[in-house]
Structure formats: C-alpha cells, structure tokens
Image (tube, grey):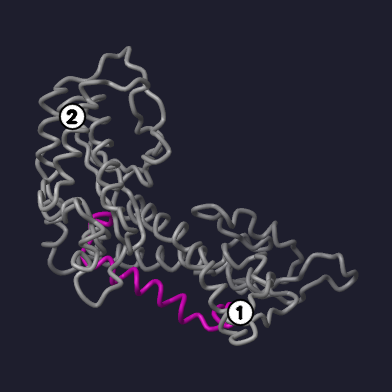
Amino acid sequence: MRFNRVSVISSSRNLGKLTMTNAASAITIEKISANVLKNALFNYFYKAKLPNTKQIPLDMLFEKERRFSSVLHGLATSLGTQLWQTLATRIATEVGGFTKLDPKSLQQPAVAVEALEEIVQDWLAKRILKKANIELTEYIDVLKAAFPRPAASTQKYQPLDKSLGVDLLLTKEGEEWAIESKTCQINAGGGREFNEKLMRWYAYRYFQKGETCKFKAFLAIPYNPYPGDWFSAQAGRIYPLTKNDVWLQDIYWDFLSGEPKTWERILSGFEQVANSKPLMDLYQQAIQKNVPDDFDLQLLAQQIGCELVISKGNSHPSNPPRWKCYECESEFEARSNHLYPSHKDEKPTIAVCPICSKPFGGI
C-alpha cells in the first residue's frame, strides 16, 4: 500500500469549478467553522472563573495588559484542545463522508510480540539517523511481509499506552485513518516522539489485521503561522518525519472535506464570529474585567440567538430570567440550563423556543 499525501487528495484538487453540491458544502463548512469557534469561545467564558489573582510587579507596571495576557493565554490553551479536533471531526463526518471510530479501538498486543518489537526498534534506529530521510512506506512493506495474515483469534490486546493515544480515528470506503492533531509549533524532540507513535500504530494494526489492512496515519498541523515554509521553520524539531507524515493546513482540511479551498472557507466561518459585534463586545468586557452582573445570561442570549428581556423574573428575584424569541416574538421565562443544557458537548443540543418550538437563530 504505497501512498503519499498528494495522491490521496489529488481528486479533490482537480475538481475545477464548484458544482451545486460543492457550493452547498462550502456553505456547510463555513457554518460548521463558525459554530465550532463560537461554541469553543462560549465554553471558555460561560460561567468561567476568570483570573483575579495578582502578579507582582507586572500588575504594578502593566495591570490591564497583564490581565489581557492571562485571559488570552487560558483561551489559547482552551481553543487548542477544543477547536481544531472538534472542527476536524465535524468537517470529516458532516462534509467528507467519514465515520468517526472510537480511538480506543486501536489497541496493542497485551504481551509484547518479540518479532514485532524487533522490527519496530530496528526501523526506529534507522529512521532517526541524521539525514537518513527514510519514508514510512519502506517500513510498512517490512511489516506486511512479516505479518501477511491477521493475528490468531486467540491473540489478546489492551489499550494503547497513554503516550501512544490516537486523537482522531476515521474510516471511509474500507480505509482507516489514525490522526495525531497538534499545534503549529512542535516542541524540541517532538519529531522523534511522533515518529515512534506513528510507527507503532502501523505495527499494531498490521500485526492484528495482516497485509490487506488499509490503514494510514499522519500528524496533522491545522495551519501555518509562519510567513514562509512551515517545514523549513520546524525542520530541526520535526525530523525524522517527512512531508508524507505531516499534513499541513490545505492538505489536511481538503482531505477531510473532499473539497478544494477548505481552509479559506474555515477562515470565512471564523470571520462571521469575529464580525458579530454584540458577541465580541461581551468578550471584550470579560477580558477587560468590566463584566456586567448578568454577563452569563447576556452571553447565553447571544449564543442561542434570542433576546434577554429581564435578567430576573418580575415577581421575585429568584424567578427565572425572561426571554424573547425573535421568530414568534413571544416572551417566556426559563432558566439558563433549560435553554442550553449541553453546552459542553462536541455538537450541543440546539435550543428551541418553548412557545413556537422553532430553533433559536444562533450561528
């Protein structure tokens, strides 16, 4: 099974002009991207305990800027874990026709298999040699020759070691894809770590299923933050991985969607959120520590797309807030957890008006 990242998506890169189906996909990609970003922001700020500790002497010198930095650092960490993997999953399954598998279904032998371990260690040593530049296809050929038939049905397996866990496992048309999703900047020594992870995924799958197994794995980088070539900027950190092992930005997103220019559409979706002035004004207030008492309720109203009429009921302070549906213009009382009960889910339940039963008009 020889392959490279270019051949895998060559069909999507040669689609030419958008057909009606392509155009519909473009709209879907934009909508998904806006929705995922909006949910990720909401999950961070909604009912969050934003930083209120002091840092001396920074608070004496740059109090406002220090708070900005603290909040944005936390937000960047939150987005790193919530945004990209959720976005990849939704585009792959809702646009690209993939099915998401349980990552825990990729397992390793319960007891180390000597012949398998010898191959892994031998090729690990070969691949990390300076300037070796060995593609994994050579290693895969060795695995296929060593284990042409599936392992015995009596073979026992166990979950992957914690350091070998899969971020995203997809299947489509009989093929499986194991993906390690990482941030744009690789830590020192990261290349060797990811190299062993990919190699062991291949080893365990071919040992279990034999040479006819249609299994592929790669490291995904969501976007290029550099003005120049990402691979040149990360060359010392990413080795011994090659461009066939690391799928960057356009290659990655076009593969998941099966459509060209997916990254441009993702950015268009993000812009929808950035241009939502009432929503962004609320986040600016949160960052600047100028948070209104009913901030969470105002934020929820923006999230689901309805109007917050009164923060508390008229008759008694303990009564639920009062809301207004933009669709039927009816007013009703409801507690926030009844309107939006699953805000931590990958794809939250769509809130509906209790009067007209139509979904609220959030992004």
Q: Residue furthest top?
A: 154
Q: Secondary structure at mark 1?
A: helix
Give the prevailing secondary structure in the magenta stretch.
Answer: helix
Q: Is residue 247 above or below residue 269?
A: above
Q: Which mark is residue 41?
A: none
Front one among 190 and 293:
190
Q: Nearer the viewer, residue 84 or 72?
A: 72
In the visual, does 249 lie left or right of 145?
right
Placement of the N terminus among the 4 image quadrants: top left
Name the residue that disc number 1 marks: 282
Asked whether 284 falls inside the magenta stretch, the response is: no
Looking at the rendering, which quadrant does residue 147 occupy?
A: top left
| Farthest-out residue, right | 316
249 over 177 or under it: above or below = below
Query: Which stretch is magenta?
Result: 255-283
Q: Is residue 272 magenta?
A: yes
Which SS class for mark 2? helix
In the picture of the structure, the residue carrying the numbered disc 2 is 119
Q: State the residue at coordinates (31%, 22%).
A: 112
Q: Position of residue 234 (x, y in %)?
A: 24, 64
Place of residue 304 in the rendered image (x, y in percent of width and height, measured from the top left): 59, 67
- Depth check, front residue: 138 or 316: 138
Above or below 131: residue 270: below
Amino acid type assigned to the residue bearing label 2 in the image: Ile
